[in-house]
Image (spheres, coloured by chain):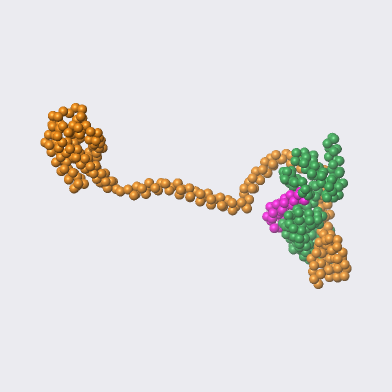
Chain colours: A orange, B green
Amino acid sequence: MMNCKKIQKDLVAFLCGELPENEQEFFQTHLDGCPRCQAEWEELKKISEAAEVLREDAGEAMSSVDWEALPSQIAENVFKKGPQSRRQTWLAKVSGFLVQPRLRPVYAALLIGVVLGGLLTFMVFRAPQSGPIAEREFFAPQDFLENVELEMARRDTLDYLEKSQYLLLDFIQAPSEKLKDYWQSEFAAEQARDLLAKKRYINPQLDKFRLAKAKSICDQIEFLFYELTQISVQLSAEEVEKLQKIIEERQIILKINLLKKELEQHNEI
Amino acid sequence: MARLARTTVFTEKLTESKKLENDSLYEDIYALIEKIKEGDREAFMTLTSFYQKKVFLLAYSFFRNREDALDIVQETFLRLYQKITLFRRGENFQNWLLQIAKNLCIDLYRKDYGKNKELQSGTPVEEMNISSQDSPDPYASSDLKRIFSACIKKLAERQRMIFVMKHYNQLKYKEIAQILGISLGTVKSLHFKAVQNLRGLAAPYLGRQL
């Protein structure tokens, strides 16, 4: 029974001579002794024979074709269209390669890559811009800044006044003989020059914050220092005394003390 | 003239060769292919004249239509010329050519015949009423052709192609497998199914014969 099933499955192949020789012999022996398989074989043979009818039909169709002329006709078309067709083929190959369905995941990945890349680039290039904004936000308002600058100006002025005071006290207290030596020393000259330079630095600040009183005192001190730096070269003993008098008369030391106190007590004058 | 004479001799030589397995024939075909690659028109014509009937038989058996078959022949050799550089030495040329023809048949079948079911199957077998026809012998050769032709057209694409290749082009299973790019077992199985289906389709009309 199993044999018959297997035989019937391969009957078509046997019919077409597609079985190996050793199997053909086995099949023939089986068919001779099995009426059922023999009947099946006969039916399949009839189908195969019926198919042969169409062969005649194909033969008729073939006889109606001019086989001698056909190759030259085909060649005519091929060699006429040849180069163009080759171009088309080249284009078709390229476009065919680009639009083939198996490349779809690649295109999808490329698209995602481009989108992500664009986003990343946008974020990366945007980052430095956010820095200054944060910095600006970090800074205090304008009035606070002005207060800070004013405080700094005040401190600078205080520092200037204090140092000036020391120098001027030295100048008043020293006898005129020693005074000359003192002012000729490099230390005093340097101190005075520093204070003159500092005055030039605090001038705009005093103007900006309208510290008029402080500025007028500082101007007088500046004038004194200017005179004092010239002492070794030009000033005589009389002139020194004159300067000492000016300091005393104008009560510059006192004014400095008052101004210092005032600056220490108030933010604004 | 001498060239034409050479070609004629060559054609005769090719025609005389009964089997493609013949080594010298293979060599001759490769030589022709090399010439075609260089644009030799006569070599192309020689090759065409040698294989045109095989291509026609395949296409005609598949479509049962002379004009379609001729179109397929034209297109097959045009494609052959365009793709000739892709042919590699060692390949079986006939199988390679029939593969092109088969692809064109399938394309045309899907494009034109696939659009219309009725066209695809011709006149449906079920609608054929042989007994009502005027012919005194309902199993006359022409009717048998018509019925069998309609039955073949009812087969699925691959079964139909395999049946045609086996019964009309007389190709071996191995060659069919190579042309269709499927396994030998699949060819055998599909051929078996094709024959069984034909038997089932034709049985009601060819009852007395089967």
Look at 53% across and 49% down and name the residue there: A114
The answer to whether residue A182 is visible is: yes
| Figure quadrant of the N terminus of chain B | top right
The answer to whether residue A73 is visible is: no
In the rendered image, residue B116 lying in the magenta stretch gets the answer: yes
Q: In this view, does A93 lie to the left or right of A164?
A: right
Which span is picked out in magenta? B95-119
Q: In this view, does B207 lie above or below B142?
A: below
Look at 21% across and 43% down and name the residue there: A158
Look at 79% across and 59% down and name the residue there: B148
On the image, which quarter does residue B36 sit in? top right
Q: Where is residue A210 in the image (x, y as percent from the top left)?
A: 21, 40
Majority secondary structure of the magenta segment? helix
Q: In this view, does A121 lie to the left or right of B27?
A: left
Q: Where is residue B130 in the image (x, y as percent from the top left)?
A: 79, 62
| Figure quadrant of the C terminus of chain B | bottom right
Q: Where is residue B89 in the image (x, y as percent from the top left)?
A: 77, 46
